[in-house]
Image (tube, rainbow, N blue to C red):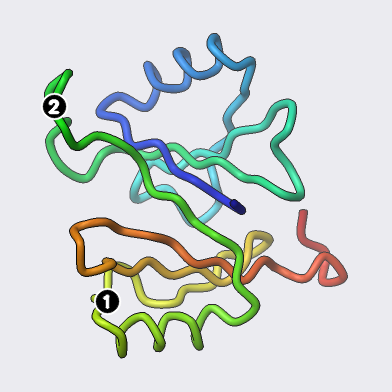
Amino acid sequence: MAHFEIYVADVAAGKAFYGGLYGWTFEAMASGEEMNYHLAAGDGIGEALSIGMMTRPDAAHPAGSAVRGGTMTFAVADCDERYAWALANGGAEALPPTDFPGIGRCAYVEDGQGNIVGLIAPADPAEGSN
């Protein structure tokens, strides 16, 4: 897994909870201001795994409900090609392929089962990304 996201109603409270639970720190992501997006740092987070936290785009699910979670994003060689494959094979657009400087090219698709999964072609470290 390359990346996953945690949706929260209160980003400050979410950062405090996960920071306390796992020892993570958070930093606002450039170009993520509109959704109050933050990237986590800590043991085991870095080259092979990144974690994002953002304001939940809808109402939080009640505690104990059957459907609760985040978005898992997996590394792919070609984000655009995999995105096109998903759309051609029963998927639906959730976020078209988008470049995030220093992160990579990302997209989200619905899987036809009510879930959203992410794709990321990580940025080339030779181009100065982290």
Residue at x-position 44% and y-position 77%: 97
Residue at x-position 73% and y-position 42%: 46
Q: Position of residue 75 (x, y in %)?
A: 60, 64
- Say if mark 2 contacts mark 1, CB within 8 Å: no
Callout 2: SS: loop
Mark 1 surroundings within 10 Å by alpha-carbon count, few (fewer than 14), some (14 through 19), many (20 or more):
many
Q: Quadrant of residue 84?
A: bottom left
Amino acid, disc 1? Gly
Q: Give the mark, 2 or 1, whose residue is nearer the N terminus.
A: 2
Q: Quadrant of residue 70?
A: top left
Residue at x-position 15% and y-position 42%: 58
CA distance for labels 2 and 1:
25 Å
Q: Quadrant of residue 54?
A: top left
Numbered circles on residues, count = 2
Q: Position of residue 78 (x, y in %)?
A: 59, 82
Q: Which mark is residue 42?
A: none
Q: Which mark is residue 91?
A: 1
Q: Position of residue 68 (x, y in %)?
A: 24, 34
User: Is 2 on the left or on the right of 107, as rendered?
Assistant: right
Mark 2 surroundings within 10 Å by alpha-carbon count, few (fewer than 14), some (14 through 19), many (20 or more):
few
Disc 2 designates what residue? 65
Residue at x-position 24% and y-position 76%: 92
Amino acid, disc 2? Ser
User: Is 127 on the left or on the right of 66, as rendered?
Assistant: right
